[in-house]
Structures are given as structure tokens and as C-alpha cells.
Amino acid sequence: MSNKLYVGNLPFSATEDSIRELFAEAGTVTSATVIVDRDTNRSKGFGFVEMSTDEEANKAISTFDGKDLDGRALKVSVARPREDRSSNNRW
């Protein structure tokens, strides 16, 4: 298992610091990223958290998946590798 987690359905007010602080309840957070729109700099409502061990990642999933944060139920799962975007799909 990977220790990098996908965190979806984040409130738009969430910051990297607030996510890092929340997930620290499950163990050591090595990185936290909230994905933002490059034009508006507004959160896209998801991000990634990397825990220091697989055990801590499992604990974070069981603790935070479905947990309410500012009125939104978090979706926490193991992050999948990003799929390559080929330029052949363009019209």
C-alpha cells in the first residue's frame, strides 16, 4: 500500500496547514497539498496528504473517510498514480 492519500470533498476554505493539522491526529504528515485553480487560485475541493508510514495512512483512512469537515463529508483513499495525458486526444 502507498502512504500517499487522496482527500476529496474538501471545504473550499481548507488550506494546506489546516489539512496537515487535521491529519496529524493519525500520525506524522510528511506533505499536504490542496489543489487550486491556476487562474482563480481557489481550491478545487481536493488534495493529497502523505503520511510517514503505511500504518499511519491506514489509520488516516479509517479515521477521516466520511468525517464531516465544515459541513462536507471527506472522501479519503489511497492515491492512484496520475495517468498520462496524451496530446492525441485534442480536437
Image (cartoon, rainbow, N blue to C red):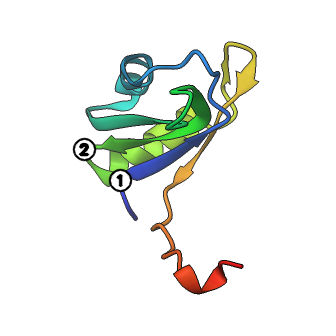
Residue identifier under label 2: 52
- Near-viewer residue (58 or 49): 49
Q: Is residue 6 above or below residue 83?
A: above
Q: Position of 9 compared to 59: left or right?
A: right
Q: Are marks 1 and 2 in contact (CB under 8 Å)?
A: yes
Amino acid type at image mark 1: Asn
Q: Please tell me which residue is depicted at 34% across the width and 44% down the height of the picture.
A: 50
Residue furthest front in the image: 91
Name the image quarter holding the N terminus.
bottom left
Q: Residue at x 39, y 22 (%)?
A: 25
- Please tell me which residue lies in front, 7 or 54: 7
Front one among 14 and 64: 14
Q: How far from the left and from the top, in percent, is residue 35?
A: 49, 38
* Disc 1 from disc 2: Cα separation: 7 Å
Give the residue type at disc 2. Answer: Ser
Q: Position of residue 40 (x, y in %)?
A: 56, 28
Answer with left or right where residue 71 lies relative to residue 14: right
Q: Element under label 1?
A: loop
Residue 74 quadrant: top right
Instruction: Give the residue number, with chain letter if any, for mark 1.
Output: 3
Q: Is residue 13 above or below residue 43?
A: above
Q: Which secondary structure, mark 2?
A: loop
- From the viewer's side, name the closer residue of 3 and 38: 38
Q: What residue do we see at 35% from left, 24% from top? A: 24
List x then y, in percent, for residue 8: 62, 40
